[in-house]
Structure formats: C-alpha cells, structure tokens
Image: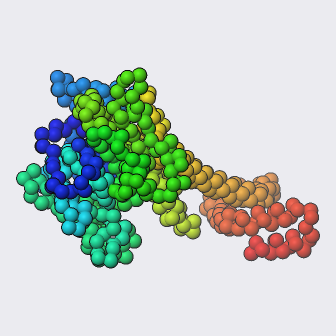
Amino acid sequence: MGHSMNEATPPARPASGEAAAGGLRINHFRQILLWPVHLMPLGDAAIQDHWTHVCNGAPDNPWREVEDEFTGNPSEFQERHYNEFVTFLPAVQRFLYGQGLGKAVRRGYGESPIRVLRRHDIAQVRVTLSAGGPPILFNIAHVDLYFFFDIDVAMLALEIHADDLPLEVAQETMFQFGRAYPAYWQENGRAGHCPQRVEWLTQQGEVLAVSDYENRQKFLSFACQHRAPCVAAHWEYLLKPLVLHHTDQKGPVRYRQLEYYRMPLMAYFAMERPDRLTRADNVRLALASGSGDSSKLPLGENYFDDFKAQHCYDRFQDNIDGRDWSSTNYWSCGLSFVVTGDAKNRFFVDTERGFLARFRHQHFLLFLIAHFHRAALQMFSDQLAGAVSRLDVSDNTAVQAFRRETRQALEAFLRFTHRYWFPEISDQAQTRDLFALCRGHLGLDRLYEDIRQEVQDMSQYLENEAMRRQNETVVRLTVVTTFGLIGTIVTGFLGMNLFSWSDQSPATKFMLFVLIFAPTVLLTLYTVKKSRRLSEFLDALADDSLGLAEKWRAFWRIW
C-alpha cells in the first residue's frame, strides 16, 4: 500500500556529545506519524472525490498518486509485497488492494477504495528539540496522504528514520515531534511540549518550511476569532494545497482537525541489549511520554500495577527451548505503537522478511485501519451533531434540511459498516493480537455502538415525526369526512326530485352549480383549518364524563 519506497539516502547521524556518557543508544530509530483530518464537503453530492481535487497534476502541486505494486509489472512484485497481502483476511484484502479491476474507484467497489498521494520534494527534517540543543537530522522515507472513497477523512502518513541516536533523543522525538499546535507556552515564550524548531529540507539541504510554535499571538488570535485551533506553519505547508477550514486562504480542499493535537505514532527501536531498558523506560515508550530518569516511573506506582498486561505484547520476548525470539516487545496505548528489539538479530532488522519489514507494512496497515476507524466514527459524530444543532422545528426549511442530512448520514454509515468496519483483520496470531490491542485502547467498539445508537435515534425521530404528521392528516381527513357527511346527506336529500331542475336552461344549471360549488369549497377549506379544534370538540361531545357546559365550552373554542 505505497510503503515500498527504496531508501537510497544514507541514514542521518546526530552530532557528537548529544547524550550523557554511558547512556543507551538506539542503533536504528524509525517513527511514523498519522494525522487524520476531516475534509469539508465540496458541494451537495452525497459522495465526494476530494483526492481528484488535490492530485490535479499542476506543476506547482507536489502530490502525485502512488501506483501500488499490484498494478505494475509482475516481475517487480516482491516477496514482501506478497507477505503483506496474505497477512490479511479476504475482506480486508479487497479494502486495501481491490480486486484487480483497475483504478477508477467511482465505477464500483471492486477496485480499491483507497487513494494514496505522495510528495517527493521533502527529503529530510531537521529537528531542534530544546533551546541551545543540537539539531537532529532525520531522513524522510515517505510523505503520503490517504483518501478513502465515500468517507470525508484524509490521513497524512509521515515516516522518518535515523541511526545511532541516544535513547533520550528518540524518546523526546516521539513526545514532541508530532504536535499540530502548542498546548501552552512557558514564561520564556517557548511552546510547551513542542520542538524548539522544525525544518523541512530538500535533498540538497534547502529549507522549504519552518515551524512557528513560538508565535503565540498567531495561535491566540486564531482561536479567539474562529473558536478553533490554528496549525503550525510547517504542518500547514506539508498539507498544501489543502487549507485549514477557518482560514481565509484559498485551496481546492478544506480540512479541520478531528482529534487531539498529538498525532498517533508508531516507533521502531533496534538497539543492543534491549533488556537494559528498565520498567520506567518501557512505560515512557509505551505512553510516548518523553525522556526521564530510568530508575523512576513517570507516574505513581499504583497506576502501573497491571500496566504490562494492558499495554504489552511480549510473545517474542523470551528465549524458549533454545530458539531466539529476538527479545522483541510491542507496546501500545492507542495513541502509540512501539516495538523494541535486538539490533544484532538479523531477523529483527531485516527489511524484506523480518520485524522491520512487518513494522513498515503489516503493522503500519493495522495501525492505519484502527485509526481510520476512529477518525471515520468521529467524523460521523461531528456530522450528526452538526445536523441536530441546525434543526429548528419551527422552520420548515430547517426541518427539510435535517431530514435530508439524516438520510445521507444513515446511508453513509451503512456503507461504512459493510465496506470498512472490520472487528478482525487477520487470522495470523501476531497481527490479530496487535490489532485487538490497538483497537481496545482506542475504544472502537464502544465508539461504534455510540454512533450507531445516535444514528438509530435520529432515524427513530424521523419515523416518529412522519408518523405524527400522518396521524394529524388522518385526523383532519376524519373530521372533514364527518362534517362533510352532513352536506352529503343534504345534497342527497335535495336530489330526490324535490326541485325540478331538469327543465332549466344550461346557463341556469351552470349558475346553480357554481352557487353550490363555491360555498362547498370554502366550507371544506374552513373545516380543514378548524379540524384540530373540531376534533377536540368531537372528543368532548363523545365523552360521557363531561357535562353540557364543558361540551359547550369545547364547541365555543372552535372559534
């Protein structure tokens, strides 16, 4: 799924003196960020095609569609592509890869509903984590943008990597790098929990965009004016030509944020003797909470009583019966997915068949699916909340708009359930268990049931409203029929040749017809207008418990 990019660029090396003497070092560090955003509607169409507006082929547009390995030359189809494909259940395979029917997704679900765009202009990122600290240079493996057919969600995927990093630098990169905007500022003006500086670089080292976390007035003014957070300049640059929904900038597609300002992340640690990681180190990795004293837990001891049971998957940690299980641990808290292992184990660092290959392909896809589910459900929740907030029962136009939006939401949620919702994605034990671990911490089942109940409640409201209107119509027709019965009997009685109209001229007959027709129409319309009160009067008249005075008052209330 677009993760087979060859990495010809040599890994970056940090400057000397970055870590304290004797500190643990990471032979190879890799981090993948996922940033889900909510795409704004382009028009009144029920199904949007945002990706076609982003990938428009303009010379200044950096995004180009990625042709996956399944549509290319079969001789170039590699074993790791096959290993990735067979990991998943057939329904998930169709979701990820389609059925080999081409690429025009609008012609049917037989083709993959995922569109991946990639930009190649950004090759490196230079991150300064603290004031006065040395900048760390990371190579960028890929910058991808995922679109999903019929779902107004896009997901930015950014993968960075470096070699020979101090443990604390890798921990702080996990903690600080994926911040869409600052949460607060310190007294010295530095943005809290954010890098001091982030720079996107070309292959030649030219600076394309720089972060502006320190521009406090920009973020404060934007939040005051739009009641929404602004996005840091370097992330804003990365998503162009997409533009933030509340800004005055012009762009083909507008977006707004769906989640917390920390982006979900995956991290890979290959190091010598991973058993040297203390319990506190593993906790900080699992929670992506930054660096700290390896001998002290970041929170109270009671909080971590069953931490490993809830957050760790250690199936491959121990050496059993002389077999080397690569001392590998997986950690997840929903927001993060971290794997640690032995850099000397060839299988752990193998990019074709080993754990690194799985991390960048199978594990990335399971993490992507889990967070796509969460983003889509949050998008549905926003849409339903917006539809209800615009409902005004006294405004017929607003009621009609609510009815239309609710029907569209029902149809979209039904299609999402049958096309995208997978409680299980694989029968392979490792992938199945890791997916369950991620979605369990994300609370996907509970979130899905909440949204499903909201959709059912709105559907039930529409059904009750339709039933109420139907009952009112039946009452009005019944009242009109009841009072029309009097006129029917009278006209029938008059039709018993009491008056001889047969000898009259046609003009006289026509005039008599008009004289009878016009009052009858007016009387019928007046009866419909008063049908509600007439119905109340008939109910009072039929109620034996009411006295004559109450019945007269009910009759008087008609007028």
Residue 266 seen anywhere in this rendered image of the structure? yes
The C terminus: image quadrant? bottom right
Depth check: 120 or 269 in front?
269
Q: In this view, does 471 lie to the left or right of 39?
A: right
Q: Position of residue 397 (x, y in %)?
A: 49, 64
Residue 260, located in which quarter of the rendered image?
A: bottom left
Depth check: 313 or 88 in front?
313
| Residue 182 position (above or below residue 474) | below
Q: Residue at x 21, y 26 (%)?
A: 77
Q: Residue at x 25, y 61 (%)?
A: 129
Task: Report the residue that reaches farthest toward the left.
Answer: 204
| Residue 413 position (above or below residue 254) | above
Depth check: 332 or 487 in front?
332
Q: Where is residue 393 in the image (x, y as percent from the top left)?
A: 57, 65
Q: Is residue 278 left or right of residue 65?
A: right
| Residue 219 position (above or below residue 461) | below
